[in-house]
Image (spheres, grey):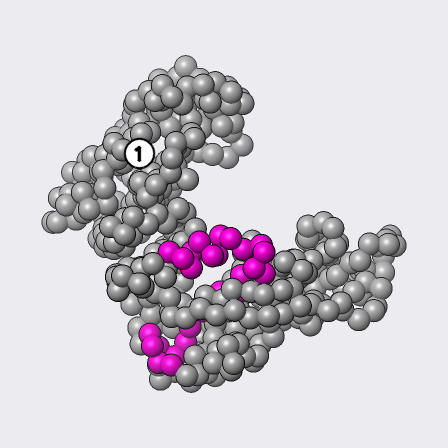
Amino acid sequence: MVLKIYYASRSAVSLPITLNATAFLSTLPRTDKLMYACPVDAEPLDRYRKGGYHPILLGSFLSDGRYKILHKLGWGGYSTVWAARDRKSHFLGTYVAVKICLSERECDRIQRELNMLKKLASKHAHSQHVVRLVDNFNTDGPSGKHQCLVFEHLGPSLSDAIDTRSSDGRLPGEIAKSITEQALLGLDFLHQQKIAHGDLHTRNLAFALDAIDDVSEHDFIETLGRPEIGHAYRSNGKDLESGIPKYIVRPARSSSLPLSKIIKIVDFVRAPEFGDRLDYRVDLWSLRCLILEIFVGQPPFDSFLITPKFLVDQMQELTDEPLPERWLGLWGTMSGDVASEDPKTRLQEWLEEMYFDGERKEDLTAQDIGRLGHIIQKLLRFDSSGRASARKILDDPLFRD
């Protein structure tokens, strides 16, 4: 069991315990600072304050009773996300995901996401590979006014699906092709609208669900797993302050809801443009990393415990091109050393070594991996203007065979 301790002015500290929470708290030194505790490992209780999270209880309603909260789907630095039943509309199904962001003065990022989604809606644009906004509204609470975005309810992220359904962390070749092609279609759709996603990776690709309109609330909750809650309390035994929820809900860990084969891009929100003006082409650098993870099963750069300068040197090694002159001044100010003088590994060599490693599934041919390297090379350009577009990549023979 893990007990999370929250000080009003500090981040959470997780500690393994073998005694009950009350007994453990009694062993701590006394402090004048307010302290909260909860046995569920989820969002920090000290973020339920002015400008922070909005407290939610299971079974409660939002937007004048339209959305009934059934489970928690997740949380992040900007929002909590909840599974809910839309009691007034069958648009995109009965069940939806409600993202409740930090209060209005703290959540410019969510407002940017909403503006992009509204822009798509205003043009009557649509792609089956980009999540659709169902509704948006404001709700008031003890932390302030919160923007709420309502989306179609989706299944697990690609990252979670790989973790749970692939024993070696690598997708079968044909599935990798299908998922990559769908991601390209979604990205091409966004780029046609001059919209950048800004944070493209496997956790921001999610599987759509088959129709679940006829699923009862009880069965829907069962497929997500019965909610696990942990009651919050103060170390001094006094009542919780206003705005602190009575309990925290652990996010749903799995789901047996029927998945479709459709992938959608979710969670709108950088690439190595050192100070350049950013536009939608920044996604093309992330796309290259995404494609490699989908096909090969691991990212191209080792970023664990290395310096910024070393990471840039890794990038240069794979791109086999110098940094643009306008970046050299900033590169010179980066901390750390460059890579060793060992022989350089080129992109195609790296791809073949990683894919044909003799330990994981190898159902793509050497020709396929050669084509994959050709695609990656088109995206692996420091200067964003030189990167191939998503539409151009879609025309590659790898996706046409």
**Which x, y percent locates residue 160?**
42, 57
Towards the viewer: 359 or 4: 4
Q: In which quadrant of the rendered image does the N terminus lie?
A: bottom right
**Which x, y percent locates residue 171?**
31, 51
Q: Which residues are magenta?
A: 89-116
The residue drawn where x is 44% and y is 75% is 223
Towards the viewer: 245 or 205: 245
Vertical position of residue 84 compared to residue 391: above or below: below
The extreme front residue here reads 122
Towards the viewer: 244 or 164: 244
Q: Indicate the amino acid at tag 1.
A: Ser
Count every numbered label the image shows and give the total: 1
The extreme top residue here reads 341
Tag 1, which secondary structure?
helix
The residue drawn where x is 38% and y is 70% is 134
Residue 329 visible to an observer of this rendering: yes
Residue 329: which quarter of the image?
A: top left
Residue 327: which quarter of the image?
A: top left
The residue drawn where x is 48% and y is 18% is 332
The residue drawn where x is 57% and y is 79% is 60
Mark 1 residue crowding within 10 angstroms, few (<14) / some (14–19) / many (20+): many
Position of 368 compared to 233: left or right? left
Which residue has dot 1 on it? 384
**Which x, y percent locates residue 47?**
65, 58
Position of 293 compared to 42: left or right? left
**Which x, y percent locates residue 24?**
80, 60
Q: Is residue 124 magenta?
A: no
Q: Is residue 110 magenta?
A: yes
Residue 344 visible to an observer of this rendering: no
